[in-house]
Amino acid sequence: MRPISFGLRPRHRPHKIVAVLAALSFSSALVGCGGDEDARARATEGLALTEAWCRATPQGATTTSCFFTAANNSAQEERLTGGSTNAADGVEVHETFVDGNVMRMRPVEAVTIPARGAVQLAPGGYVMRLVGLKAPLVAGTAVPAQLTFEHAGPQQLLFPIRIEAEPAS
């Protein structure tokens, strides 16, 4: 298997990153508040990405794991094939498995999301790994990423940084 690694993204100036974060926050607010009927309709008919978050990292860490749920509301199977972010040199999708008494991870080429189904990238299962972190990820901040899907194409997603997963309600 070959790891999913999508090369280096050009470095952006901090003011551009802030502008991107602001735009993502604003567009998310519009969708959540009902301001954009077309965007809500597309999410209902196609791919919905929710519950995104990444683990905070200590100083010097070079990798972290990120998680989200991908719900495929279409009649066609979908595949997560990769991604990119300015926060790291690369993005890889891994699966967690047990080898004897040891939990390990290995890269996978893609994650299949069944038609009218969902896949959760979560601790202990499939995870999205950010490799070659450019700075520590601090709880309370967020990292934008672009995820690539076979049919839906590139999808923007904002990953809040947390120390732990929020408890289920």
Image (tube, rainbow, N blue to C red):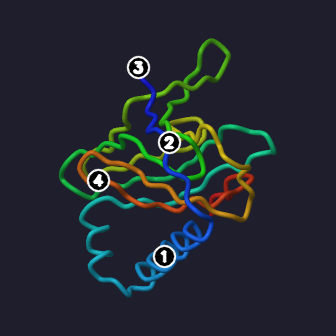
Q: Which mark is residue 1?
A: 3
Secondary-structure class at tag 2: loop
Q: Earlier in the sequence, mark 1 or mark 3?
A: 3
Real-space Cα separation, disc 2 to disc 1, in angstroms: 23 Å
* Residue lying at the far right of the rendered structure: 59
Circle 4/circle 2 CB separation < 8 Å: no
Could you classify mark 3 by the number of other residues whose Cα lies within 10 Å: few (under 14), some (14-19), or many (20 or more)? few
Distance from disc 1 to disc 3, alpha carbons, whole Å, reads 36 Å
Specify which label sits upstream in the sequence, 3 or 2: 3
Q: Position of residue 38 (x, y in %)?
A: 26, 78
Q: Amino acid at mark 1?
A: Ala
Spot occupied by residue 121 in the image (x, y as percentages of width and height): 50, 44
Task: Specify few, some or many for label 4: CA neighbours under 10 Å numbering under 14, 14-19, or 20 or more.
Answer: few
Determine which residue is flagged by label 4.
153
According to the image, label 2 marks what residue? 8
Which of the two residues, 12 or 35, is positioned nearer the viewer here? Answer: 12
On the rendered structure, is 86 left or right of 120?
right
Q: What SS does tag 3 mark?
A: loop
Quadrant (top left, top right, bottom left, bottom right) of the C terminus: bottom right
Q: Nearer the viewer, mark 1 or mark 3?
A: 1
Distance in Å between CA atoms under marks 4 and 2 = 19 Å
Compared across the picture, whether 58 is left or right of 24 comes to right
Q: Is residue 85 above or below residue 38?
A: above
Work out whether residue 127 or residue 7 is closer to the camera in this orientation and state it. 7
Q: What residue is shown with label 1? A: 23
Decide: few, some or many residues near mark 2? Use Cα within 10 Å; few <14, some 14-19, many ≥20: some
| Circle nearer the viewer, 3 or 2 | 2
- Relative to 73, does residue 129 appear above or below in the rendering? above
